[in-house]
Image (cartoon, grey):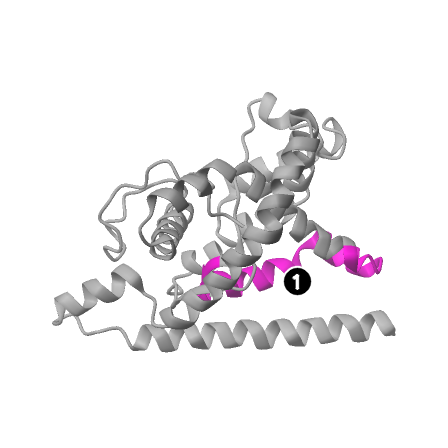
Amino acid sequence: MHLTMKLDLNSKSLVFIVLGCLILTLSACAKRPPEADVEARMIYDEANDPLEPMNRQIFAVNMFFDRIIVEPTARLYRIWGPPDIRDGISNFVTNWREPVTFVNDVMQAEPKRAQYTFSRFLINSTFGLLGVFDTASKWGIEGHNEDFGETFAVWGLPEGPFLMLPLLGPSNARDFSGFVVDFFLDPVSLWLEHKNWTYVRYGRLALRGLIYREENLETLDDLSKSSTDLYATMRSSYRQLRLYDINNGDLDTSNEDDLFDEDFDDFGDEFEF
């Protein structure tokens, strides 16, 4: 009974959050300048940031939190964690996110990619010792990531306004909606919730953030030193990365709005969370 009530509350919270973000997405889309006003449309598309003053304030808080807690922790993790151990932890965390990728592969009508994802999870969970070793990649079955934000995009939902989320970083209304769906409906998370291992459920998210930060120490350091406006750089890079992910690495966006005129270069997974 207690478990049922808890799941019901989570489901209601999920519905309200997602509906709120979808409404924000659609309302932001409605404010887009008309096609006749070319210059205004270009400015809007380039930034897509009607909440910029608030977003910059959140970004400043995030950077402060990163400077005093996250970055030092990531550096200690690198110093104290041998590379093989860090790789094993990263592989383990990635493997147990494969069910989310599989569900989104199916929802995006990508049966071949879903087959690869299922095969990777099966192989790495067995021969890879629960995912500590990426055996599937050694066997030529390369991985990929999918999330519900990308699924919403494939379904044709517009991205909505750019958002800078507390602690989580760059996003938009569509991606944040997808993040909430992924988090609450992740099969592994639901199993952990069923076991009342809530601390493990949230610990997975924190560990993913730590791994990401350690892997991108130099990259973010370089961006901080070279960018005259780090916030704008992060915003632009995030939007380019998401466009890249949504198109599964295909940068031919002839069927999309011309959001970005420059090539997506070496950012790779830098802004994934």
Camera-side residue: 4 or 89?
Answer: 89
Whole-percent x, y for residue 257 in the image: 25, 58
Amino acid of disc 1 = Phe
- Residue 46 visible: yes
Q: In the image, what residue occupies the spot 53% across and 58% down?
A: 64
Q: Is residue 176 magenta?
A: yes
Q: Is residue 5 left or right of residue 145?
A: right
Which segment did they paint magenta?
A: 170-199
Whole-percent x, y for residue 74 in the image: 61, 42
Q: Is residue 82 left or right of residue 193?
A: left
Under circle 1, the secondary element is helix
Secondary structure, magenta segment, majority class = helix
Q: What crowding class fits label 1: few (fewer than 14 Cα within 10 Å), some (14-19), or many (20 or more)?
A: some
Residue 62 to residue 26: above or below: above
The quadrant where residue 199 appears: bottom right
Q: Is residue 178 magenta?
A: yes
